[in-house]
Image: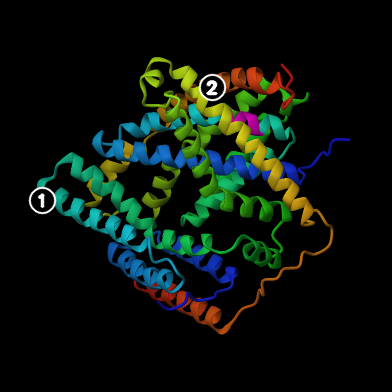
Amino acid sequence: MSKPLILDPRTKFSVVLIIGFLIFGSSVTQLLFLFVVMGIYGFLNGVRKSLPIYVLFLLLYFLSDYLASETRNILFVSIAFFSYFIVCFLPALLAGEVLVRTPAGQLMSALGRWHFPKTMIIAFAVSLRFIPIAGLEIRSIHEVMKQRGVAFFSRTGWLHPWRTFEYALVPLMIRLLKISDELTASAVTRGVEAPIRRTSVHVIKFRSCDYVVILLVLALAFFLLMTR
Amino acid sequence: MKKRFLGIRDVVTIAIFTAAIMIIGSALSKVFGVLSFLTAGGAILVSGAIISFLTAPLFLLMVLKVGKHGAIFLHSILYGFIFLLAGLPHMVIFYALVGLIGEVMMMPRGNGYHNVFRAGLACSVFLSVKALHPAAILWIIGNYNPQGVHGYTAAQITKMMDIYFNPITVALIFVLTFAGSAVGSWAGAKILRKHFVKSGILQINE
């Protein structure tokens, strides 16, 4: 399988912004066109495993749209209506997934070049990196609760909801505080509070593929705006 | 001396709590999204209340632990940035405004950021306004693309928009979410007093 493209994070950020504004006001045909283009962009940037899920959402929309126009049933109309909103965001979600996959250090250096406030850069990078870990922490707490017979959908869970709420929340809160202490110590050790400009091992510069991607996205935006 | 502005520890704490709140919120939103298919959108009314009830204790702990102005605003802006990644750049403006509302709630004199009642009230107002974001999304899409759904007439779309975005629905979502987050804050304060204040992890003013 071919290697993913190496793009500057600022290019990925620009693509998210442009596509984010383009999805509004686009017709279904234009959205499909955007989806195909972003699908290729995502594929070239290493978003391969989740592509079928996006396609599945698209199929759900077409199916519910067909059933709604055939039967006029309120349930199918509702599903079609909501799935349309999901379909609206699919191109932007694909562009977003490419950006989310950028290593935190690279993203921080690139945003630093754009003179983003340091507080914002650190918070943004930490929360992006922590989202999957938070999911794991919640799952591991639930596993322990299951082993002790106090899980949400166990007998105790139904009989004593307040206790279950407490059993789930307190370990999570303590874990979050502990992780924030550990991450702070790690960040301070790496000199994040230093008043000088941060250097990085990542080479942050626009390459020819960045210019090509930006030009293509701008051309796409121009084409879609002209055909409205 | 305690720093007046957000330090690295505060920023990391806010980022971590934001991620956890977002994970819980998005997982429950998915469940309510499926339920809303089955209830023709009815689940949307209570989803904000339930999500706020469950996330209010985390929000309260974050605010009281950081205890400085700017915590709610940074949390809100982070939320906006994460929505930006999902293709909604407009939501950064919405969340900046919501964050400012939350900060204004903590403005009155006194040590508001350590006062559990003030923090709970700010949490309830903040989460209630935040719960209107699906309506904001619908409003943005509706204004940009009123006849977007393939195969439907503009009148049908207007009817659907009337169901999901009318003043009564929005007011109902706001009131229910306020109630949910107020109960969540009360429960959160109880948990914090029992487990965190007693052990010295957290200092609060009653």
Q: Residues within 10 Å of mark 2 (few under 14, many from 20)?
A: many
Question: Is A123 positioned to the left or the right of A72 in the image?
Answer: right
The structure residue drawn at horizontal position 18% and vertical position 40%, both measured from the top left corner, is A74
Q: Circle 1 sits in a helix, a strand or a loop, which is it?
A: helix
Is residue B136 positioned above or below A142 on the image? below
> Residue lying farthest bottom?
A208
Tell me the CA gap for discs 1 and 2: 45 Å
> Main SS type for the magenta part?
helix
Image quadrant assignment for residue A171: top right
Is residue A79 positioned above or below A13 on the image? above
In percent of width and height, residue A155 lies at: 36, 19
The structure residue drawn at horizontal position 39% and vertical position 63%, both measured from the top left corner, is A91
According to the picture, the residue beneath numbered tag 1 turns out to be A70
Q: Nearer the viewer, residue A147 or A181?
A: A147
> Residue lying farthest right?
B1
Q: Chain of mark 2?
A: B
Q: Tell me the quarter of the image containing the N terminus of chain A.
A: bottom left
Q: Nearer the viewer, mark 1 or mark 2?
A: 2
The three-letter code of the residue at mark 1 reads Glu
Q: Nearer the viewer, residue A130 or B166?
A: A130
In percent of width and height, residue A168 lies at: 51, 28
The structure residue drawn at horizontal position 89% and vertical position 35%, both measured from the top left corner, is B1
Asked whether the viewer can see residue A192, the reply is no
Tell me, yes or no, whether the highlighted magenta stretch contains residue A64: no
In percent of width and height, residue B129 lies at: 52, 34
From which residue to which does the magenta span run? Answer: B57-62
According to the picture, the residue beneath numbered tag 2 turns out to be B182
Q: Circle 2 sits in a helix, a strand or a loop, which is it?
A: helix
